[in-house]
Image (tube, rainbow, N blue to C red):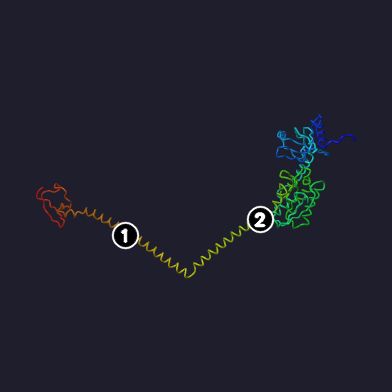
Amino acid sequence: MGLKPVSVSQLNSYIKRILQTDPILGNVSVKGEISNIKYHDSGHVYFSLKDEKSTIRCFLPSGNADCVSFRLEDGMEVNVYGYLYLYERGGSYSINVKAIEEAGEGVLMARFRELKKKLETEGLFDSSHRKPLPIFPHKIAVVTSATGAAVRDIVKIIKNKNNYVDVLIYPVTVQGPAAAGEIAAAIDDINIRFEDVDIIITGRGGGSIEELWAFNEENVARSIYNSRIPVISAVGHETDFTIADFVADRRAETPTAAADMAVPDTNELADYISRLNREITHSIRLKVQQSENMLNLMKPELFKSQLKSRIVMAQMKCDSIYHSMKSGIDASIAEYTNRVEVIGEIINSSNPQLILSRGYAIVKDSAGNIVKNSTEVSAGDKIDISFAEGSTKAKVLSE
């Protein structure tokens, strides 16, 4: 009791100096299985390294993470190289990782792959067995922890989208040795006792491979497969995959995504129905207006008035056609008359009688041939002379 008390900060500072000056702890190599890995936006990587009995935190700075040639995942067995570091404010220590290499597959990951292969061989992952989700479910059962954030998010999303759907919360533990049995039993029980349930959502929020392991157990997979009710698996975050995801009728990246895909948005449906109602009402009004117009046209007084107008218009059209045709015919007659007169003049200009009327005569020999030259007749030949009016016979006295 003679020692003077020190502050917590002084104690943590002292321990930190001891860790940093120890030659072994300043350069350690540790083998273990990765668990609860998280990639930060800054590029740093945080994870735990565990074996059968213990766990230690690890910190991989972004600069060192860039040098790792493979992606770190939960369940992976690795060798890490670095030094022990104490975070004074929190009083916790971790391994600051300088380098990391693969050492093999972790126990849980090996179990995961083995079961996945077995169930896949049996056909539990075949798409042919997957049941479609009902378009308008009336009741949805949610198999998850009653106190977790997942159930609150699911109920909130469903009620915001669709107030007509009933939600049955079937509470189970989603982590620990008893979780898989409770989840499988809940799915079986809902299929037996709740015939009005249309969809089952089972899942939980994200976590390490150990925290999600209940959804990698065979009994959960077989209960999902044997369910007559469509099952949506909503386990973890977007990058988390479990056996339940492969066997379920639908996989959702998150619990909220499961709620979103399970129900239609009644607000959108209401808007759609309102739009249809407006379009139908407009179409009916237009049809009624058209029918009224047709009925108005059938009124005797209106029909008589319109008939008179139509007759007048038809008469005017007939008159126009008549005058147009008459003008065309008159023009054609005048044109052809002119052509005939021109042709007549041409023909008359070639008429021999016109030539004779100007004092000319036609001389023909005794054979009736026209004499064109005095050498064609001889003294004593008889000839016929034709005048414009009449003819006479003559005798050639000399050549």
- Viewer-proximal residue, 272 or 196? 272
Measured as percent of width and height from the top left, residue 168 is found at: 76, 55
Label 1 crowd (10 A; few <14 / some 14-19 / many >=20)? few
Locate residue 312 relative to residue 59 in the image: left or right: left
Q: Is residue 123 visible?
A: no
- Viewer-proximal residue, 148 or 244? 148
**Circle 1 sits in a helix, a strand or a loop, which is it?**
helix
Label 2 crowd (10 A; few <14 / some 14-19 / many >=20)? few
Q: Is residue 370 visible?
A: yes
The reply to whether the C-beta atoms of the residues labelled 2 and 1 are less than 8 Å apart is: no
Measured as percent of width and height from the top left, residue 154 is found at: 73, 51
Figure quadrant of residue 196: bottom right
The type of residue carrying mark 1 is Asp
Locate residue 66 relative to residue 311 in the image: left or right: right
Q: Which residue is denoted by mark 1 in the rendering?
A: 330
**Dividing the image into 4 quarters, which one contains the N terminus?**
top right
Q: CA distance from mark 2 to mark 1?
A: 79 Å
Question: Outermost residue, right direction?
Answer: 1
Observer-side mark, 2 or 1, equals 2
- Residue located at (41% from left, 66% from top): 312
Measured as percent of width and height from the top left, residue 208 is found at: 77, 42
The vertical placement of 100 against 320, above or below, is above
Question: Outermost residue, left direction?
Answer: 397
Question: Outermost residue, top direction?
Answer: 23
Q: Which mark is on residue 26?
A: none
The type of residue carrying mark 2 is Asn
**Circle 2 sits in a helix, a strand or a loop, which is it?**
helix
Q: Earlier in the sequence, mark 2 or mark 1?
A: 2
- Viewer-proximal residue, 125 or 101? 101
Measured as percent of width and height from the top left, residue 255 is found at: 73, 49
Q: Which mark is on residue 267?
A: 2
